Each structure stands twice: as C-alpha cells, then as structure tokens.
C-alpha cells in the first residue's frame, strides 16, 4: 500500500499535469501543441481513474493492476504521437509533414510487430503481456527519437525557445528513467531509494512543460551560438 | 521516392537501435517496469504471479557448477 509520501507526490503530479493544460489554454498554445495537451489531458483523466480504482479495490487488486498498465500503454502511445508532432514542428519549414506522418506510423507498426514477435510465446495473458511490453518498447523508441530530434535541432540551428524547451525536457525525462533503472540494477541494495524515485521523476515532464507554456512566449528565440559551438 | 526510402531506412534504424538499447539495458534487469506515465504508484505487472524468486529449471539436477562439454 502506498504511504503518505507516495500519495503526496501523486497529488502534486496530478496538479502539475492539469497546470500544463491550463497554462497552454491561457497562453493560446493548446491547438498549436494539440497532441502534447491531449496527452496531458489523458494523463489527468487516467490519474483520476487510477485513484478511484485504488481507493475502491486496493493497491494489490487485479483491477488496479490492469487499469494502471492499460492506461499507461495508452498514455505512452499518446506521448509517442506528441513527440511526432514535435518532429513536425521542427521540420515544418522543409514541408516534411507527410514524411513525418509516414515514419511515425511505420515505426509504431514495426514496434507493435516486434513486440508481438517477442511475447507470442507467452501462453498466459498474451494481450496484457503485449500491452505492457509495447508500452516499454515505445518508451525506448521515444528515447532514441528524442535524441535524434535533438541532433536535428542542433543541425538545423533551431532557435524557437519553447520548442527547444519541450524537446529537451522530454529528453531529460526519458533519460532520468533509464538512468534510474540502470543504477537500480547495478546496485540492488539501493532499490529502496531508487524505486520511489520513479514516481518523483513523473513530476518532471509536466513541470517543465508547464514552465515552457507559461514563461516562454511562442516568438521567443535563442541565439544559435548558445546551442552549439561552431568551429571556425 | 528516394525521400520515402530514406524515411523507411531511418525508421528501421531507429527501431533496431531502440530495441538493441532495450535489450542491453534490461539484460540484467529485475523485470520491473522502467518507465511509467504520471506519478501514480506502480503496481507489479499483472502477468507475474507473486513476487517469489524464480526457482531453478527442473531439468538441472543439483546445484553443482556445470563442467565444460567433454568434446
């Protein structure tokens, strides 16, 4: 059963996720970053649903387990599409929207097929196994995609501050989970410290995105020299 | 056409890279979930029945270290 700290972090997370949507609406950025905001809206709804099921059935119940992992898979797919819209923003001047859409669908199909190939030998709970694995595989695809996008931002000398903030925070968010998992497995005795940190890391993305929508105007620009050092 | 092929190639490269990275990271993992959306406490995965450690495979008799193959 989660303790008071876990409930506190959960509640703060819910507030941060709602804050992203409110900030985007207030700064008229909701439609411009539609999928990012839909992801956050779905996150708020799923957090409320998780809380209701946890309160009704308990932490170890099958209901909470299934609802948690199925909603997590839906959220990961939303996050994946949100990331693809960031690609569309970065490559907007190259008229590459068609290719971004094509690549997004192709990669999603490839990941789903790969996941199915891996879990098809699992005789029991094939669908559930597939859903959880797909979510984790999409997480790694998202991680690689974010770093590729960051490389493209550097190469194209992208200067839109808000867009850079959104992409960078996503990169840090993914990396925090990967680093935490790696440390947890390198030093198993420290698991009691690093496992609860997963929950705390969940706060990072909504906080960073809320900041990006609230404090950074759409027309703010960064000096390219601050992004990359160009050899003379 | 070449742009479409470039997209397909890049997609496959990303997929291979991501799955390779996942295999590398989770090779010595404890099977727990790496990432979770939101700040809700994560329950154990539903397809793992209980948290008991996995027993040795039934076809190994005893816990003696395996010798090298005789050939």
Image: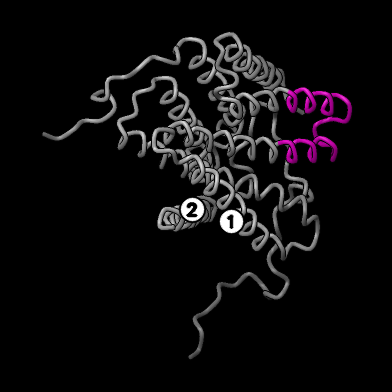
| Residue underneath mark 2 | B11
Location of residue A166 with respect to A178 vertically, above or below? above
Q: Say whether residue A204 is magenta.
A: no
Q: Which residues are magenta?
A: A45-71
Circle 1 Cα neighbour tier, 10 Å, few/some/many (<14 / 14–19 / ≥20): some
Q: Which residue is mark 1?
A: A110
Q: Residues within 10 Å of mark 2 (few under 14, many from 20)?
A: many
Assign a secondary structure to mark 2: helix
Q: Is residue A46 above or below residue A180?
A: above
Nearest the viewer among B33 and A147 is A147
What residue do we see at 54% from left, 48% from top?
A102
State the quadrant of the N terminus of chain A.
top right
A175 vs A110, nearest the viewer: A110
Q: Numbered disc 1: what chain? A: A
Residue A228 percent coordinates (x, y): 25, 30
Q: Are marks 1 and 2 in contact (CB under 8 Å)?
A: yes
Q: Is residue B26 visible?
A: yes
Q: Is residue A51 magenta?
A: yes
């Amino acid at each position: 059963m989660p303790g008071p700290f876990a409930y506190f972090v959960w509640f703060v997370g819910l507030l941060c996720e709602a804050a992203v949507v409110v900030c985007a609406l207030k700064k008229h950025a909701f439609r411009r970053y539609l999928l990012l905001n839909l992801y956050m809206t779905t996150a708020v709804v799923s957090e409320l649903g998780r809380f209701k099921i946890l309160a009704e059935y308990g932490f170890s119940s099958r209901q909470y387990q299934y609802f948690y992992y199925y909603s997590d898979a839906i959220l990961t797919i939303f996050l994946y599409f949100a990331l693809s819209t960031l690609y569309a923003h970065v490559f907007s001047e190259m008229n590459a929207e068609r290719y971004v859409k094509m690549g997004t669908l192709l990669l999603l199909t490839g990941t789903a097929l790969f996941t199915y190939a891996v879990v098809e030998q699992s005789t029991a709970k094939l669908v559930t196994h597939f859903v959880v694995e797909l979510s984790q595989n999409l997480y790694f695809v998202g991680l690689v995609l974010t770093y590729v996008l960051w490389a493209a931002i550097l190469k194209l000398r992208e200067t839109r501050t808000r867009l850079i903030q959104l992409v960078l925070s996503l990169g840090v968010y993914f990396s925090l989970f990967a680093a935490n998992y790696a440390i947890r497995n390198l030093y198993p005795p420290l698991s009691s410290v690093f496992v609860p940190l997963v929950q705390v890391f969940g706060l990072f993305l909504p906080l960073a995105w809320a900041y990006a929508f609230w404090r950074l105007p759409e027309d703010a620009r960064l000096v390219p020299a601050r992004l990359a050092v160009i050899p003379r | 056409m070449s742009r479409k092929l470039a997209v397909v190639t890049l997609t496959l490269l990303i997929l291979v890279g991501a799955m390779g990275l996942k295999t590398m990271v989770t090779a010595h993992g404890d099977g727990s979930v790496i990432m979770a959306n939101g700040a809700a406490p994560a329950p154990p995965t539903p397809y793992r029945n209980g948290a008991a450690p996995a027993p040795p495979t039934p076809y190994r008799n005893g816990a003696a270290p395996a010798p090298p193959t005789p050939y």
